[in-house]
Image (cartoon, coloured by chain):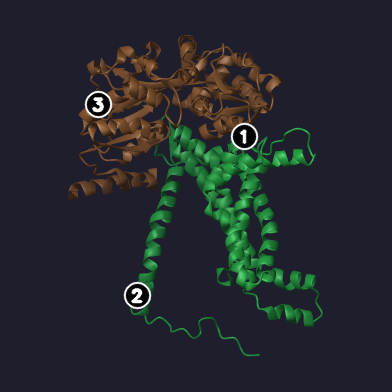
Chain colours: A brown, B green
Amino acid sequence: MKNSRILRTLSTALRRAAYGLPLAMTLTATSGQAADELNALVWCDHTDPALIQPFEEKFGVKVNLKEYEGTGAALAIIEQSQPGDWDVLVLDGVDVPRVAETGLLAELPQDQMPLDDVFDAVQMRDMTFKDGKMYAIMEKFGYNVISYNKEKVDPADMRDLSMLWSDKYKGRIAVYDYYIPLMDLVALKMGVKPSDITADILPEMKKELFKLKENSVMVGDVVASSTALAVGEADILVGGGEWAVSVLSAEQPELDWVLPEQGGMLWSQALAVFDSSEKKDLAVEFVKYIMSPEGQARLATSSCFWGMPANAKARDALTEQQRTALRWDEQEGFLANSHRYFIPDADLDGQMLDTWTEFLQH
Amino acid sequence: MQRQLPRHANSRPARSRFGGDGLRAWGFLLPALCWTLAFFVLPLAIMAVYSLWQRVGYKVVTDISVQNYTAFFEKSFLYESLINSLEVTVMVTLISILLAYPLAYILAEKVPPRWQRIALILAILPFWTSYVVRSYSWILVLSEGGILSNFLLDIGLTSEPVSFANSRGATVIGFVHFFVMLLTLTIFANLVQLPKNYRRAAADLGAGPIRTFIHIILPLTLPGIMVGAFLTFVLCIGDYITPAILGGKRELLLPQTIMLQIERRSDFPTASALAMILMAVVSVVYAACARWLKLDRM
């Protein structure tokens, strides 16, 4: 490493010390990649060897994976890194515009991307394109809806959001702890479109949340809430979906999920290449591999969590059991009745988080 | 009786502040000093500065203000998380002391010296398991259909499966399981240092076992209890994992509220202010316990 680079590294580390030393350590760990390596900042589903190994073997490279949660954490890691340290980024679909706005992402070669094979509702060109240039491609999607144990609850009830507020399932409900999709679901129950949420309806929303809390047995993150459903601590997971139960479909076929009639929240994750990558060609090959039907099927059924592959051609690469667990045949209706995450402005975001914190404290 | 010499009376005085032994002392001290400065004082100072900034929109504004601190007292759900933390921590500390003392006493007084090492290893075995794994294991014990529920069903104490998970009680159990071991070690270390003659002298003067314990043994083991209790308090009040896994977010403790600010909004200024308040609480507790925190008696 050249002296100037060392000085720059030190300078950056000191300037950004406020972000925390662990991140500075990440910087050290990821600096100086070898020519036959690709560095990817990913969600946990990309860390499945069954997904990555075929690419590594085909191209004779090592893919170094750094797992993160939340776009904020990814941006902090990037902030701590040197340009060129990272090649590939997996990020929340709704965050693509703001990350692209920063200039971090490289333009993807549209002619090499299977965009036409991606489900229409998942292409989200308004998010992945800017000024006619493509900066990311949606690779996987799913829903924040209702997961349940069909041996313990009436599956027909699960198609009606309001049943979760009735006394029938009091004490049998787990709630996924993520305020945006959960408050969006509460809005749908109230008959309000998530995109129409304003500060004016927050008091009413708070009452609905408090009632939901009284019916619930726990509120937890991805692991805790999924575990509650898997071990029988709860029979219903609000905010769950295929991501919470499909990976268990072989061992626990009694766990299922559904999108209720009032609608559900659509989550998506996107794949992008860093503009500062010194291995853009290889990074693009990685994107092409992930977007291929085989790569998509492996990503969809990753050992970390399952989700729908964005590429509809992955259908034939999935088994019948996998398609059933993902409710493949209902996707058309589900996509039509689902909404993207509502992205509030900063002030409303703060008020929504305060409301959610009150809900947790209730 | 032989007059007691002042402590370190026989040790050589340092020749100068920076020469000879003094220099060597600084040499030994420097690594720890640098470590503390780099990984405690500097981060703490950064956090203190950050707590006076504000997050406006999606950006951090560097205007100095105590707004984040006033918000803590204005928003009930924020200060309630501190009250919850204090309640849980005090409960855990007291229960851990009550369970750890008899265990340490039996280990120190009733177990033959040659078995003490093995008994101590058995006592601290839970430390060898991953903290997170141990917390999740408790869910399997406490949840509906778990070991405890099945046991109560088998002995007829309940006719329906019951759940103890996802509650404050579960959080307390998870904490106590861990901290009893810590307190056992500090109290044991204190107990084995007590000369046997103290008990004999008390007996000669007519004191029974209970009186000897209350007036001689307990006061002399107070430093061990207080060191363990303080460590328990500090580790417990700052813990995020156990309440997140076992508490089921039925309520929020302060570390969870801090994490919420960071994870969901990247609101480092508010999170820093809450962390400084937590730090202040720990400092107050330290000040209150300082007279008993005699590490040289450990």
Q: Is residue A232 above or below residue A158?
A: below
- Residue B158: x and y in percent read 78, 37
Q: Which residue is mark 3?
A: A284
Amino acid under disc 1? Gln
Query: In this image, B259 relative to B39: left or right?
Result: right
The reply to whether discs 1 and 3 touch (Cβ–Cβ < 8 Å) is no
Residue A19 lies, with reference to residue A161, above or below; the image says below
Mark 1 or 3: the one toward you = 3
The residue labelled by disc 2 is B23
Q: Is residue A298 visible?
A: yes
Find disc 1 in the rendering and name its residue: A361
Give the amino acid type for the residue marked by disc 3 in the picture. Val
Marks 3 and 2 close (CB-CB < 8 Å): no
Circles 2 and 1, Cβ within 8 Å, touching? The answer is: no
- The chain ID associated with circle 3 is A
Chain ID at mark 1: A
Question: Viewed as shown, does residue A63 lie left or right of B82?
Answer: left
Horizontal and vertical percent position of residue A267: 45, 21
Q: Give whichever of discs 1 and 3 has the lower sequence position.
A: 3
Checking the image for residue B266, the label placed there is none
Horizontal and vertical percent for residue A94? 40, 22
Q: Residue at x 52, y 43 (%)?
A: B274
Image position, residue A198 (x, y; %)? 52, 18
- Residue at 27% x, 33% y is A57
**Secondary structure state at the residue bearing disc 2:** helix
